């Protein structure tokens, strides 16, 4: 097992970011089914590696009842060299009222046993972390766009 931890700062207050993350994953969590998601690793401005995975979300547990973590798991669609992952996706408070952090942490199992462990040590870990950054960028951008849109609607209705 290899550990994975990535975070992305959001231009969105903590409480709103929590609500927007919940609305983004709620449909998948409620159905209890996995859905196909294309995970991407940008290689250059023009190219990216991508892999379809079966991803699922479920409400997680926070013993402090402060954050609202979401359990996230994914399995590669059709097998291959992509690892399976299980962990949590959480919005955390930041030092400023106007910002928050989107955090993904968990573990993944490199495929192919001992050969996969060597591959992970050489390059696989960088691929896993880059893919996680891209996932957080995608979800974080959606949260920020939805937040700006709702704020613009509030301003327009005044």
Image (spheres, rainbow, N blue to C red):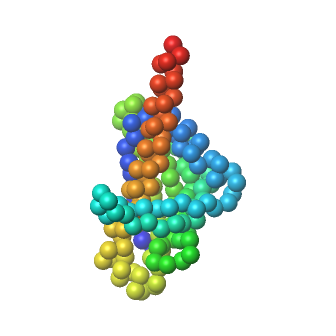
The image quadrant that residue 23 belongs to is: top right
Most foreground residue, 94 or 98: 98
Is residue 63 visible in this depiction of the protein?
no
Q: What residue is rendered at 38% in x and 56% in y?
A: 133
Q: What residue is rendered at 50% in x and 52% in y?
A: 89
Q: What residue is rendered at 44% in x and 55% in y?
A: 135
Residue 68, position as x, y percentages in the image: 55, 45
User: Extreme front residue here?
Assistant: 46
User: Extreme right residue here?
Assistant: 31
Residue 20, position as x, y percentages in the image: 54, 39
Is residue 33 visible in this depiction of the protein?
yes
The image quadrant that residue 13 belongs to is: top left
User: Extreme bottom residue here?
Assistant: 114
The image quadrant that residue 43 belongs to is: bottom left
Residue 109, position as x, y percentages in the image: 48, 74
The total of numbered circles placed on residues is 0
Most foreground residue, 92 or 146: 146
Specify whether 133 is left or right of 52.
left
Q: What residue is rendered at 54% in x and 49% in y?
A: 69
Can you say which quadrant of the picture contains the N terminus? bottom left
Specify whether 132 is left or right of 53.
left
Q: Is residue 17 above or below residue 114?
A: above
Q: Is residue 114 above or below residue 125?
A: below
Q: Is residue 124 above or below residue 130?
A: below
Specify whether 80 is left or right of 54.
left
Residue 76, position as x, y percentages in the image: 53, 71
């Amino acid at each position: 097992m290899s550990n994975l931890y990535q975070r992305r700062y959001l231009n969105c207050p903590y409480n709103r970011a929590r609500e927007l993350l919940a609305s983004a994953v709620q449909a998948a969590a409620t159905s209890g089914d996995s859905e196909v998601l294309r995970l991407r690793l940008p290689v250059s401005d023009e190219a990216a590696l991508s892999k379809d995975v079966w991803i699922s979300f479920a409400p997680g547990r926070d013993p402090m009842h402060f954050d609202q973590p979401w359990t996230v798991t994914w399995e590669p669609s059709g097998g291959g060299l992509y690892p399976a992952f299980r962990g949590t996706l959480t919005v955390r408070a930041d030092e400023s009222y106007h910002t928050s952090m989107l955090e993904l942490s968990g573990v993944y199992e490199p495929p192919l046993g001992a050969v996969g462990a060597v591959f992970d040590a050489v390059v696989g870990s960088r691929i896993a972390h880059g893919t996680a950054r891209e996932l957080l960028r995608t979800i974080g951008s959606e949260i920020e766009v939805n937040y700006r849109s709702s704020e613009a609607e509030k301003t327009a209705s005044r």
